[in-house]
Amino acid sequence: MTGLGILGTPRCLCLIAACFMLAAFLSACVGGGTDAATDDRVLTLEANAHSLEESLEALQEENAELRSELASLRQEQADYVQAQEAASAAREHEEEVADFEEVQEQQLASLEEGQAQTGERLDGLESRLLELENVASQVSLVLPSIQKWTRGMEQRLELLEGDVIDRTVRLAEGAGGEVYFIKHPKRKEHAVLLMPLEPIEGNPLIVSLHGYGGNSADHALYLPLHERVIADGFGLILPNGSTDEEGRRFWNPAGPGYEVGKSDVDDFAYLSHVVAEARMLKEFGPVYFLGYSNGGFMSYWMACQGLPGLRAVVSLAGTSYVDDAACKGAPPVSVLHIHGTDDKVVQFDGVQGGSDKDALAYAGAEEMVVRWASRAGCEWPEDPKAYGGMDLDEFVPGAETQAYRLDSGCAGGVSIELWAGEGSGHGPGYGDAFTNALLDWLLAQK
């Protein structure tokens, strides 16, 4: 309001000055003369008018300054308001930023948790992928064996018909040669003997023993030595063990009187009888015992008890319950011990004695070759070096079987050898390569 009054002042002064001049002019006209008093008044009025004009100019300058100052104040006010609005906006922005940062921190925490879960999921997926790759690898290894098995399935199904002896005979007859039965007064089942059609005096005789719960027919399918009788010219005996309370066939590899045997069956006497009967049919040469698992235990027991004419023992996934003192006086024989390092049934390193009566102690693979090397007057090295690797187990990739040999310094040309199947289990996937390698070693023990 004050500013507007100031701005209106020059116009008011002009009006006042005009009024004075008009009044002076009228006074002069009314007087009708030009006396000295009138002249003085006119001069006075002119002086006042001049003074008013000067005042008017001063006021105009002051008014201009006030206008400029007012404009500055208004600009300052506008700047202040703008600054206030900017500050308010900044505060709101800071609050929004703070809220955003809090939300961002929560999102980051959620992302980190999600990333951790994703990482765990990825680890799980990678682990599962490795498992699947391993399974695929195992399937690719087993598939040829499965395909080989399925070929001629009708014939194999026929072999499953009938009792164990019938099936064993069909296998033997299918391979050619002559088939004989060896009877024993205390056994219901006969042992099956397969000989070449034209036997030669001095042919070796192989006795092949099944594992616990197995039988001669299934064992012959797993280790088909009957298919090589004609080509390699040896006799083959396929006997069956006694049956336990659960109807499973077994061998007693410790003999009567040994607590570890858990049976009064004298299988050494039985198998000695079978070998003697076979020799009455033909003049066989050296005798070889080959056994799988429980049959491997029994093969060692035959050597431990000193079977006449026994030249070599092959034990696959089998060892011995009894200590070496029980074999005192046994003659030296060549030994081939075959064992998978991942065998969970009969462990490669053996089992030490303990309080658990159900967990029978038995020797490890290396201990067995040490025992029989010592019996032959030679010493198995503490740190043996493999002389080569063989790809025998179709379930394990590569040349998994490491072969160790001690064939120098042993009495009577005895050879002690260990085939350690790296990664092989209790029932390796053996095929023709194994059969060839096995018979090459066994028939070389003259």
Image (cartoon, rainbow, N blue to C red):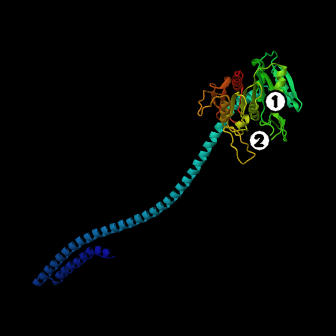
The residue wearing badge 2 is 260
Cα distance between the residues tagged 1 and 2: 19 Å
Asked if residue 290 is positioned above or below residue 86 in the image, the reply reads above
Q: Nearest the camera: 103 or 231?
A: 231
The residue that appears at 82% across and 40% down in the rendered structure is 263
Helix, strand or loop under label 1: helix
Going by the picture, which residue comes out furthest to the left?
36
- Tag 2 or tag 1, which sits nearer the N-term? 2
Residue occupying image coordinates x 56% and y 55%: 110
What x and y, as percent, mark residue 8?
29, 74
Image-based side of 82 in relation to 34, left or right:
right
CB-based contact (under 8 Å), mark 1 and mark 2: no
According to the image, label 1 marks what residue?
Answer: 271
| Left or right relative to 30: residue 90 | right
Q: How crowded is mark 1: few (under 14 residues within 10 Å), some or many (20 or more)?
A: many
Q: Residue 314 is drawn in which quadrant?
A: top right
Point out which mark residue 189 bears: none
Asked if residue 236 is positioned above or below residue 241 in the image, the reply reads: above
Residue 128 coordinates in the image, percent (x, y): 64, 42
Q: Dividing the image into 4 quarters, which one contains the N terminus?
A: bottom left
Q: How many labels does the image show?
A: 2
| Horizontal arrangement in the rendering, residue 125 relative to residue 217 (left or right) | left
Q: Quadrant of residue 37?
A: bottom left
Q: What residue type is labelled 2?
A: Val
Say if 298 sits above or below 309 in the image.
below
- Give percent across and percent down for residue 395: 68, 32
Instruction: Find residue 116 and report its horizontal and vertical position in percent.
Output: 56, 51
In this view, the residue in front, 345 or 119, is: 345
Q: Quadrant of residue 138?
A: top right
Residue in view at x 21 percent, y 73 percent: 58
- At label 1, the amino acid type is Leu
Q: How many other residues sit within 10 Å of disc 2, few (<14), some (14-19) or many (≥20)?
A: some
